[in-house]
Structures are given as C-alpha cells and as structure tokens.
Image: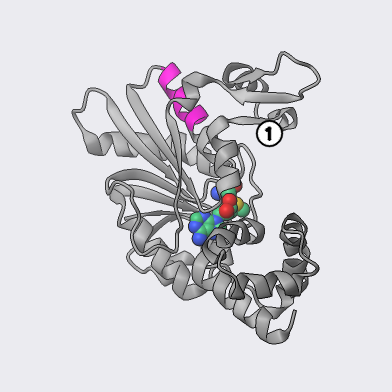
Amino acid sequence: MSDARFRALSQLIEAQVGIKMPAGKRFMLEGRLLKRVRALGLASVSAYVDALFDGHQFEDELIHLIDVVTTNKTDFFREPAHFDFLRQTAVPELMKLRGSERVCSFKIWSAAASMGMEAYTIAIVLDEMVRSGLRIDYRILGTDISNPVLRIASKGIYDIEVLTQVPDQLAKRYFLRSRDPARAECRVVPELRRHVNFQRMNLMDSTYPVDRDVDIIFCRNVLIYFDKPTQRKVVSRLCSHLRPGGFLMVGHSESMVHSLVPDLKQVRPTIFTV
Ligand SMILES: C[S@@+](CC[C@H](N)C(=O)[O-])C[C@H]1O[C@@H](n2cnc3c(N)ncnc32)[C@H](O)[C@@H]1O
C-alpha cells in the first residue's frame, strides 16, 4: 500500500481502537491484513485498503479490522501476584469497609477480557474463598472490543492444553473435559460461568455502560498499546467506575499509569486504589 494509505489506516486504527500503529508495525499489519484480503477475495493489501476507504461497507469491515489489529494473548492465572492480592488483601479490606453487611456482594470488571481466562481466574479465586466459608457473593463482567474473543469467552470452552496453567486440584474442580477424546477440549463448569458475563465495549468510548460501584477492575496488558493521552483518559474513566477504596490492577509493564493519573494511590507496583 502507498505511504499515504498506510498513514490513513494507522490514523483510523488509533482513533477507533486506541492502538498505536507506527511505521515500524507496517510489515506486521500488512501480514495480518492478508487474512481479510483472502476472506474478501481481493488481490492485495492495497486493494483491501482502497476498498475500506472507498467502499460502502466501511462500518462492517471496521469490526473485522479491529479483530485483525488486536493482540489477544492471555492465560489463566497470568501474573499471579494479582490473584494473591485479590485473595489476601483486596477482598478482606473491601469487606472491612462494608462493615455490617451479612453477605458482601462484589462487582469485578475484567476490562480487556480477551478470551475470558482472566475473568474465570478471578471467579475461581473467589469461589475458593466462598468454599472456605467467607460470606461473599460476586458478579464478574468481562468486556473487550473484539467479537471473536468474546464468543470464546462466553462459551468458556478451551483447548485442553490450558489446564497446564491451572493447579491440578482447581482444574479438576472447575473444568469439565470433553467426553469425546477426539475433541481435546475442556469447559468451565456452569456453577462458575453463571457468575460471569461478557459484553462488547470499546475502551476508547467516552462513556462506559458499567455500574459506578465496581470493587475491583482488572485492566491488564492493553494500556501498553495506547499513547499517553489515551492511557490517561482510559484510566481516569475506569477509576470513575470504582467505589471508594476499590482497586485497579494493570499489567506488569503498565505501572506508568501512576504518573499519568495523580489521584491514584499506588499500593503495589501495578495495583492502585482510589
Ligand atoms: C493482550 S490481551 C489482554 C488480556 C488480559 N487482560 C490479560 O492480561 O491476559 C488485550 C485485549 O485488549 C483488547 N482491546 C484492545 N483494544 C481495545 C479497546 N480499545 N477496547 C477494549 N478492548 C480492547 C484486545 O481485543 C485484547 O483481547
């Protein structure tokens, strides 16, 4: 594609998704776009970009373009210190703030949920706390911009390989293995899935359709793709959905949000409270 088309495309991606697409990523972007070029039966990436800007299917194609440019890597129990903090510190401190409530109801938001592993890991940790006798109830919301990952998240069906990321006892308790050995799949048990909902949401939107009394927000491994002004806006908007004393967790390479939003109190390198 021409330099001008690449610039227009990278501006479009940054405006719609927030993801920076500098010249250094041009090769990667062209490689990923080939999937759409083939799917649409076009001759080249240039033809795709021309069709995107000149055609009438712009809005429909934008959804596919977003799926092409987003990086969905995720795991169960990824960056496990956050889940230790959830169990050992966040839940006990938030329960203290609630005082006399008989059963404490928690709202947790996985704000770049990808295929749902983060949301289900949170559910496993909280369910283990319930089993140990804690009087809590919980709802977990997972949001993401990408429709294909949200479909996987909602089903909660994964390749059996993911179970290597989950301690054995928890894998036995919270996953069902496919009865058909030819399908090497497992599924999160319904008792856990009923606590978790997924919906599409773009972090670039100026308002978020989410409650304003969320206890804990996980927004991990997505801010890194945004430029500083976007990071600042997104983190400020997220924090406006936290209840006082609530926590925000970001990815291990995203602790810089602290310097961008001064109202945040840093309680661990990548954990903040308001
Ligand atoms: C690398 S994954 C991180 C998943 C999970 N939070 C974790 O740490 O394992 C980043 C996710 O952010 C999503 N994403 C990228 N831009 C987004 C945006 N503007 N709004 C909402 N989600 C976005 C991508 O679709 C992707 O699923």
Task: Report x, y in % for residue 21.
Answer: 64, 73
Give whichever of 13, 190 is nearer the camera.
Answer: 13
Tag 1 residue: 165
The stretch in magenta equals 123-132
Give whichever of 47, 66 is nearer the camera.
Answer: 47
The answer to whether residue 193 shows anywhere in this view is yes
Q: What colour scheme governs how the chains and residues are painted in the rendered image of this protein?
A: one colour
Q: Quadrant of the C terminus?
A: bottom left
Quadrant of the image occupied by residue 262: bottom left
Quadrant of the image occupied by residue 105: top left
Label 1 secondary element: helix
Q: Is residue 209 left or right of residue 189?
A: left
Residue 59 drawn above or below residue 140 = below
Task: Report x, y in % for residue 115.
Answer: 59, 41
The answer to whether residue 251 shows anywhere in this view is no
**Which residue, as the protein is rendered here, is positioned at the far left?**
100
Q: Quadrant of the N terminus?
A: bottom right
**Which residue, as the protein is rendered here, is positioned at the far top?**
179
Q: Is residue 131 magenta?
A: yes
Task: Report x, y in % for residue 155.
Answer: 57, 31
